[in-house]
Amino acid sequence: MRKLLIILCMGLCFVSCSKAQNEKEPAMKEYDAKEITKLIKKGKSVLFANAIIKGDVDFSDIEDVDMSAPNTFVAHVPSSIYFQSCVFLGNVKGNGYKEIRGKKIPVKVRFSRDVQFMDCDFRKDVDFSDAEFQASVNLSKSVFRGETQFNNILSIGQKNQWWEIESDSTFMMCGATFRGDLNMMDAKFRQDVSIQGITVNNIQISNLTADKRLDLSNSTINGYFIFNYGTCEENATLSFSRFAGRADIIGTVFNGTCEMERSLFYGEVKFGRTNFKKGLKTDGAHFLLHPTTEEAVFENDTTPAFNGFNTK
């Protein structure tokens, strides 16, 4: 009996030690950024997980480049791009320049397959301005510590998962076009965030936190717009925009002024339980249906004017 107990105890210790060993996080390997472009030039997929990438990553620095317009080159990236839980120590770029006879010609990058940077840590600047994504883009749970730019990008993929991203510096996505849906739930922006002039089908930004200014003006939302239980510490601008579908702004707190001047709302609009602490500006805005305002809090308890085509 005593021998049996000893054997059982040894077995339990072995299982516990094995479990503890398996629960340890895998060691992160270091790679030079040039290895990424080497894989692309060879036509291979870019697959990295739990890696540290040293140096600047420049997706425009490849051989497959042609001229799409008199003053623009396109760098073709046919490979799948997959990064999981990686740390980028240098800048990451999706654009560049090609020097022709002493003149610098812009180069934009066209990604033919899915691009994923999931749960990644970008220590410096990220700039994918003017890039084209022929498939979906996944940036979920990634942290951007430097200045981040996705200006004028084109994303054709139906599902673009950008939920739980965090940005410590200025985040800009002006003039971006999404042919499909964009999910930015639980995003956190500690500096100004500008999503000005975007075109998107459906957009989900519930639980978004903006510590500074949020700019969504001059945008076209062709489907639904969901901004529930968010927080904007400073001014939020949704002016000069077109909302074709349902617009839910429920339980959100605007500590600064919320501006919706000259915007068009063609679908149902819900402001229930939202707190507009410094006022809601609706001058020149048009609402096809009267917004739902149950338990909404307006500055000085004064409900703003909701003018439109069929308001009740």
Image (cartoon, rainbow, N blue to C red):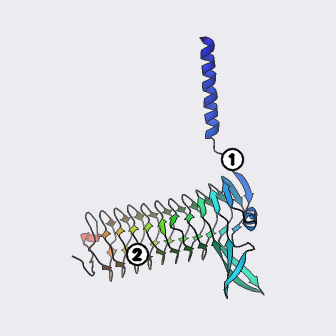
**Along the viewing direction, whichever of 286 and 126 lies nearer the viewer:** 286
The residue that disc 1 covers is 27
Question: What is the x, y in percent for residue 234?
Answer: 42, 69
Residue 46 against residue 311 in the figure, above or below: above
Disc number for residue 262: none
Q: Is residue 286 left or right of residue 207?
A: left
* Label 2: which secondary element: loop
Residue 70 against residue 24 in the figure, above or below: below
Residue farthest left in this picture? 312
Question: What is the x, y in percent for residue 163?
Answer: 50, 60
CA distance separating discs 2 and 1: 45 Å
The residue that disc 2 covers is 238
**Along the viewing direction, whichever of 1 and 76 lies nearer the viewer:** 76
Q: Dividing the image into 4 quarters, which one contains the N terminus?
A: top right
Q: Is residue 128 left or right of residue 291?
A: right
Which image quarter: residue 75? bottom right
| Tag 1: amino acid | Ala
| Tag 2: amino acid | Leu
* Label 1: which secondary element: loop
